[in-house]
Image (spheres, rainbow, N blue to C red):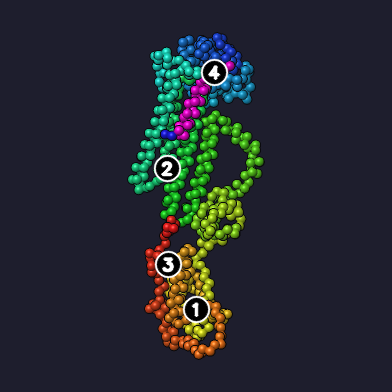
Amino acid sequence: MTTTKLRPLYTWALALVLASASAATAQEIDLSGRSDCSTPKRAALTWLANLQDDANHPAQAAECFDWDSAGVDSASVQQRQARHLKAVFDQRGLYIDVDGLPDVTEVPDEELDEGRIVLARRLPAVYLEASDAGWVISADSIRQIDRLYDETFDVDVEGFVDALPEWAKAQVLGVAIWQLLGLLVALMLGIVVRVLVSRFLMSWVTRFLRKQNQKWDQKILRKTANPLGTIAMVAVLWWMLPLFRFSVRVNQIGTIALRVMAATAVVLLLYRLVDFGADIFAKRAEKTESKFDDQIVPLIRKTLKVFVVVVGVIFVLQNLDVDVGSLLAGVSLGGLAFSLAAKDTVANLFASVSIFADQPFQIGDWVIIDGHEGTVMEVGMRSTRIRTFYDSVITVPNSIVANVAINNYSLRTYRRQVVTLGVTYDTSPEQIQAFVEGIRAIFQNNPAVRKDAYEVHFRNFGDSALELFLYFFLKVDSFSEELRQRHNLFLEIMRLAKELNVDFAFPTQTLHLETRAKETEIPARVAPPRDELEEAVLAFAAGGAKATPDTPLLTDGFFPAVSKRGDDGDGGEG
C-alpha cells in the first residue's frame, strides 16, 4: 500500500483530530440550567445546552418533549431518552443548526414542513411541533428513540470506557488517548480489509475468467477490484466511528468524509465497469462481419461514462449535504448563457445521432469528407476521427460531417480500372487484333473481373506507340485485394504479349549517323502466321493450356519467404 493510496485516510484522520480540538459544540449555549420551550430555537437549545459535558442538567433537558402523548411518565426514563437522542445525533454527525431555527412563537406556514420543523434533514423522523406547552419534540419522535439508539450503537462502549485506566482517558489536543488509539486501530483495520477484499476479488474473477477461457489485463481487473475494497473499508470505518464518542462536529466531518469516499468509490467502480463491459462487447464485435457494432461500442462507452460522471457528481454533492435541487435551479437561471456557449456541442451531439441513423460510413471505410481522405477510425459523440494515408489523424466535428457530401469508396461493388497499353509501331494488324482478343479472353477467364462491362480496343496512334485502351471493373473488397488482382492480370497480359511476339513501346528517337563503317541492316520483325496467333489467343482463353487466372498472388507468390507480408514491427537491424 503506497503513500499515495493512503493519503485520503491520512487526510480523513487529521480532519477528525483537528475538528476534535477546535469544536466542542457549535450551538449557542445560553439556557444552561433552565428551560424555555416558547420557540423552536429555544426548545432545541433547552435540550442540547443542558446535556453538555460542562453543563449536565438532564431534568431541564427533558422539558421540551411531548412525554404525555408518548405515554412516558418516569422522570428517569425521560432523562435517559433525552440523553440517548442527543447521542444519536452526535454519533451520526447530525449537526443541528440552531441559529437557523425560528425564534418566534408563531411560525409562518411557509417555514413549516406539514406543521413540523425537522431538526436534521438526514433524520426526518425527529422533529419539533407546536403544543399547548410550547414547541416540543413530538411523541412520534420519542417512540423512535430506542430504535435509533440501537441502530447507532451496536457495542456498549460506556462500560469499556469506565474500565479504562486514567492515562487512557487523558486528552491530547482535546481528544482522549483511547480515542486516538481506537482511531488508529480502525484505520489499520480498514486498510487490511481493503487489501483483502481487493485481492480476493482479483483472485476470484481471474479464476472465473479462466474457466470461461477469457483473458483480461490484470491492470483492468485491479482497477475494478480496488473501488470495491475501498467501499468495504468505508463500511468498517462507518461502523467503528460511533464507538469513539467524538463530538458532533467531529462525527459530522467524519461521516461526510466517509460518504464522499464511498460515493467516489461507487462512481469509479461504475466508470471502470463501463470499460470492462465495453471491452467484452468490443471483442465480440470483432468476431462479427458487421462493422456497425464496432462503430456503436465506442459511442456507448463514452455515453455511459458521461452519464456515470454526471450522476456521480450529483451523488457526491448530495453526500456533501449540498442542496442539489437549489443548485440545479440556479443553473437553469443561467441556461441561456449556457446554451449559447454549448451551441456547437449540442449541434455535434444531434449530428452524431443523425450519422448513426443514416450510417453513411462505418469503421474502417475509405472516405472523403470535407476534402479529407482516409479511413474512418472512430465516430464519437462530438467528432469523427479519420486516419489519412499519411498516417496522420484528422478530427472532423460531426456537425460538419452531417452537412457535407461524403464520398465512401468502401461502398463500391466494383472498382473501375482504366489502363492504356502501348505497343511498338512494327506490330502487325493481325498481332494487334490477336492481342486485343487475348486480353478479352483473360478478362473473361478471371473471376475478379466484371464480365458484362469491359472494353478492350485499339484506340489511338500515339507519338511513340500504338495505344490499346483497357476499361474494366474489379469486384474486390479492399485496396490491397485490388492491387493483387491488377498484379495478376498484368502478369497474364505480359505472358500473352510474349507468346504473340508483341513488344511494349516506350518513347524512342531514331538517330542517323553518317560513318565509314559498313552499313548493316536491321532485320525486319516477322509476324507469326494467322493460325499461330489464333492458337496463342486460345491458349489464354478459358480452359487454355497457358491460362492462369488463379496465378499465385503477391502475398503468396513464387518466393513466400520474401513476398509474405510481415508485422508492423518487423524489419532489419541497422
Mark 2 lies on a secondary structure that is helix
Q: Is residue 395 above or below residue 423?
A: above
List the residue tagged with mark 3: 554
The amino acid on which the numbered mark 4 sits, given as a three-letter code, is Thr
Give me the residue at 44% from left, 30% from top: 234
* Residue range highlighted in magenta: 3-28
Labelled pair 3, 4 in contact (Cβ < 8 Å)? no
Mark 4 lies on a secondary structure that is loop
List the residue tagged with mark 1: 504
List the residue tagged with mark 4: 25
Residue 170 position, x and y percent, is 45, 15
Compare marks 1 and 4 and give the one earlier in the sequence: 4
Q: Viewer-nearest of labels 2 and 4?
A: 2
The amino acid on which the numbered mark 3 sits, given as a three-letter code, is Leu
Q: Real-space Cα distance between discs 1 and 3?
A: 23 Å
Q: Is residue 56 magenta?
A: no
Give me the residue at 49% from left, 57% from top: 364
Q: Real-space Cα distance between discs 1 and 4?
A: 102 Å
Q: Viewer-nearest of labels 1 and 2?
A: 1
Question: What secondary structure is the magenta-colored segment mainly?
Answer: helix
Crowd band around label 1 with a 10 angstrom C-alpha radius: few (<14), some (14–19), many (20+) = some
Q: Real-space Cα distance between discs 1 and 2?
A: 62 Å
Residue 208 position, x and y percent, is 35, 43
Q: Viewer-nearest of labels 1 and 3?
A: 1
List the residue tagged with mark 2: 219
Mark 1 lies on a secondary structure that is loop
